[in-house]
């Protein structure tokens, strides 16, 4: 959905809309548990200070849903397989970052990209003696996936938090931003999730399944307040912030990315087109536009590898510039 097509929202109205959004959102079921996990994670990953201090990135991934009923049977969804977020998380970990991975339930997870679609049923077999073992063609992929995932999670470098709805996503993003505040310039937000632009406020949402016998559906969706502005201004004012701009029409992509960069005061906007998103992205900053391509000479290479390398360099320059 297009986040930049709305008319300008005056600041006061924006804050009112944000208050309304959070006040009317259904409370997170596991809010205290998420806060505790975040506190522990940040404490563990913010021990050193100064130039060599650890860096923490919040990677968001997958699409948010907009429920149409409180006892939800139907919802509006935003497209995202979660591949970008999962792959990027792996490269951030390799680059020495700790990662908070906020992802849509059921979408692609870090370290699972080389596994078949249904790993449990396709990677394992049961012997006559009822022992479970890995099928030969997948043994290397399974060993690597489990080994690297385990090292990242048990080593306290990867915290995975799931969401489904736009309500959960924005509430958890807020908690994450609050928990990362003391990391200063060493914090990064990499917002690859496809976030709904319109929603049905919880208060005006019907309780039960909408009946088709009532005839055509006529419903009014309210605009989701532009949280990117608030994230940059209030939630994480010194963190390095990267958002994504997705379009299907290449003619308007760069223009839209530039508008988003300025409007939300992002440090970089990664522009991508739906059809070519796995081949090329364009990193738009206030001073340049850099095309980043997948290395086509290598079958397994992906665009996230050079993308994260570039963004890590940009983050380093940002830290050096602000902390010196
Ligand atoms: C993206 O543009 C991501 O790169 C993709 C990744 C969702 C295209 P996949 O998950 O795809 O690998 O299948 N994310 C942001 C999409 C978005 O909704 N951006 C909003 C906009 O373009 C701003 S938040 O207006």
Image (cartoon, helix red, strand yellow):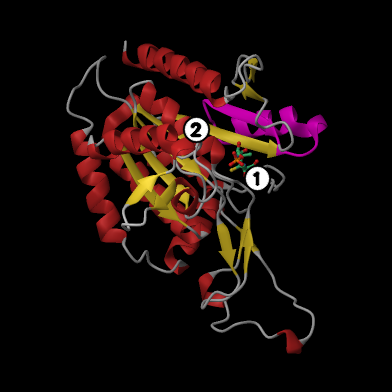
Most foreground residue, 6 or 113: 113
40 sits left or right of 17 in the view: left
Specify the label residue 3 is tagged with: 1
Most foreground residue, 163 or 134: 134
255 sits left or right of 136 in the view: right
Q: Could you say which quadrant of the image residue 299 lies in?
A: top right
93 sits left or right of 193 in the view: left
- Which region is colored magenta? 247-273
Q: Could you say which quadrant of the image residue 158 lies in?
A: top left
7 sits left or right of 28 in the view: right
Q: Which residue is mark 2?
A: 87
Q: For the residue with label 2, is its CB less than 8 Å from the closest atom of ligand 1? A: yes
* Residue at the far front in the pictured view: 128
Q: Is residue 88 above or below residue 213?
A: above
Q: The C terminus is located in which quarter? A: top left
Circle 1 — which element? loop
Identify the residue at horizontal 43%, vertical 69% (top origin): 26
Q: Is residue 148 highlighted in magenta?
A: no
Most foreground residue, 111 or 233: 111
Circle 2 — which element? helix
Quadrant in which ligand 1 is drawn: top right
Q: Is residue 98 above or below residue 107?
A: above
Identify the residue at horizontal 24%, vertical 37% (top origin): 156
Q: For the residue with label 1, is its CB less than 8 Å from the closest atom of ligand 1? A: yes
Q: Position of residue 101 (x, y in %)?
A: 40, 42
């Amino acid at each position: 959905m297009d986040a930049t097509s709305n008319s300008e929202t005056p600041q006061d109205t924006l804050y009112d809309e944000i208050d309304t959004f959070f006040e009317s959102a259904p409370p997170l079921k596991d809010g205290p548990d998420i806060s505790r996990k975040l506190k522990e994670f940040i404490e563990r990953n913010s021990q050193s200070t100064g130039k060599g201090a650890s860096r923490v990135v919040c990677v968001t991934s997958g699409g948010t849903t907009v429920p149409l009923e409180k006892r939800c049977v139907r919802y509006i969804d935003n497209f995202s397989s979660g591949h970008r977020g999962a792959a990027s998380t792996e490269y951030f970990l390799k680059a020495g970052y700790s990662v908070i991975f906020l992802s849509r339930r059921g979408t692609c997870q870090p370290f699972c990209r080389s596994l078949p679609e249904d790993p449990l049923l396709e990677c394992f077999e049961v012997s006559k003696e009822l022992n479970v073992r890995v099928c030969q063609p997948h043994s290397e992929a399974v060993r690597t996936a489990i080994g690297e995932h385990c090292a990242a999670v048990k080593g306290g470098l990867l915290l995975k938090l799931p969401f489904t709805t736009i309500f959960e996503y924005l509430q958890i993003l807020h908690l994450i931003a609050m928990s990362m505040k003391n990391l200063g310039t060493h914090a990064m937000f990499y917002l690859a999730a496809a976030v709904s632009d319109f929603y049905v406020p919880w208060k005006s949402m019907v309780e039960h399944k909408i009946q088709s016998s009532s005839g055509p559906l006529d419903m009014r969706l309210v605009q989701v307040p532009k949280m990117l502005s608030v994230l940059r201004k209030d939630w994480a004012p010194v963190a390095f912030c990267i958002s994504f701009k997705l379009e299907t029409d290449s003619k308007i992509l760069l223009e839209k990315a530039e508008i988003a960069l300025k409007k939300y005061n992002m440090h970089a906007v990664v522009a991508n087109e739906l059809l070519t998103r796995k081949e090329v992205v364009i990193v738009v900053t206030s001073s340049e536009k850099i095309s980043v391509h997948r290395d086509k000479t290598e079958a397994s290479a992906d665009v996230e590898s050079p993308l994260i390398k570039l963004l890590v360099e940009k983050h380093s320059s940002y830290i050096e510039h602000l902390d010196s």
